[in-house]
Image (cartoon, helix red, strand yellow):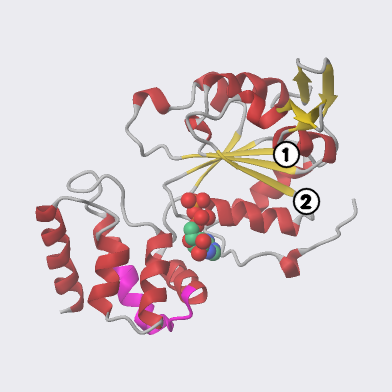
Amino acid sequence: MTHAKGAADAPFYLPQSDECTVFEAAHENGLPVLLKGPTGCGKTRFVSHMAERLGRQLYTVACHDDLAAADLIGRYLLKGGETVWVDGPLTRAVREGAICYLDEVVEARKDVTVVLHPLTDDRRILPIDRTGEELVAAAGFMLVASYNPGYQNILKTLKPSTRQRFISVEFGFPRPDLEIRVVAQESGLDEDRVRVLVRLAGKLRALKGQDIEEGVSTRLVVYAATLIRQGMGIERAILAAMIEPLTDDEDVKRGLLDLVTAVFG
Ligand code: ADP
């Protein structure tokens, strides 16, 4: 295996647990991986870090409710009066032995899961109906998908027949000591000033399910710290980055601001 790139170029990622070891073992054995966890807790960063570490090209697809199998596989396009086949990101990854990351896979249309099934068992094949090809995945190809089990949408869960084809790794918000390091590194704000933001994040997360649907993400704590480092007042930064994104309800907002006063007061 040739490693054109390597760990030294990998984007910063602070492990929460043994997820790097699990990912490496899955990659070594050509097994697909499902990353479960709330938004903004480091899943995408983890995948780019691992792809770089393993020296693999990465194709990332942000799934949405209009995403169809053809968007992943490819389609015939008209180019200069000629009809030519253009590979989609999944097909490219299969041919090149790259990593294909399907972010929020449950959002995609149903026909996408059908395409994934023959790729996630030991055949590792991608049938392309339109061209009649049946591609066998090149060595190094790996399918990675993420989903957020927190969304209470019964129509948007992964079917057991799909989820049981993946090794699964659960992501949560990092432990406070780790999150402080992540936020300080990402924002450039010193750890002492970050600590209290992380404490506030912990309190806001404890309210999940009562007043707010999702707890504040690490991404939002990074945003708040970035604004503060840049000179914005702490309360203003927190309101913009850690309160407004969570709710539109004025009463709830007032309640959350009381919490801010309690933490900083
Ligand atoms: P997700 O894909 O889970 O929605 P991201 O990977 O985009 O979340 O993470 C959001 C941001 O949080 C990243 O851009 C990064 O700044 C930060 N982050 C979260 N966890 C980590 C971590 N363990 N190491 C480094 N950065 C992290």
Q: Indicate the position of residue 171 as horizontal and vertical percent values.
A: 48, 49
Q: Quadrant of the C terminus?
A: bottom left
- Kindly report the distance in space between the C-alpha atoms of the residues bearing marks 2 and 1: 9 Å
Q: Is residue 68 left or right of residue 122?
A: left
Q: Which of 212 and 21 is in front in this view?
A: 212
Element carrying mark 1: strand
Could one spot residue 18 in this view of the protein?
A: no
Q: Which of 78 and 204 is in front in this view?
A: 78
Mark 2 in CB contact with mark 1 (< 8 angstroms): yes
Q: Nearer the viewer, residue 208 or 236?
A: 236
Residue at 27 percent across and 53 percent down: it is 246
Residue at 30 percent across and 69 percent down: it is 199
Residue at 83 percent across and 19 percent down: it is 134
Q: What is the crowding at mark 2: few (fewer than 14 residues within 10 Å), some, or many (at least 20)?
A: many
Q: Tell me: is circle 2 under 8 Å from ligand 1.
A: no
Circle on res. 202: none
Type of amino acid under label 2: Arg
Residue at 53 percent across and 36 percent down: it is 63
Element carrying mark 2: loop
Q: Indicate the position of residue 232 as horizontal and vertical percent values.
A: 32, 81
Residue at which label 2 appears: 56
Q: Which residue lies furthest to the left in this view?
A: 251
Please identify the quarter of the rendering in which residue 219 is found: bottom left
Principal secondary structure, stretch drawn in magenta: helix
Q: Indicate the position of residue 90 as horizontal and vertical percent values.
A: 71, 34
Circle on res. 142: 1
Please identify the quarter of the rendering in which residue 78 is found: top right
Q: Nearer the viewer, residue 261 or 121?
A: 261
Q: Does the magenta stretch include residue 192?
A: yes
Q: Indicate the position of residue 119 as horizontal and vertical percent values.
A: 72, 26
Is residue 111 depicted above or below 21 in this figure?
Answer: above
Q: Give the range drawn in magenta.
A: 187-199
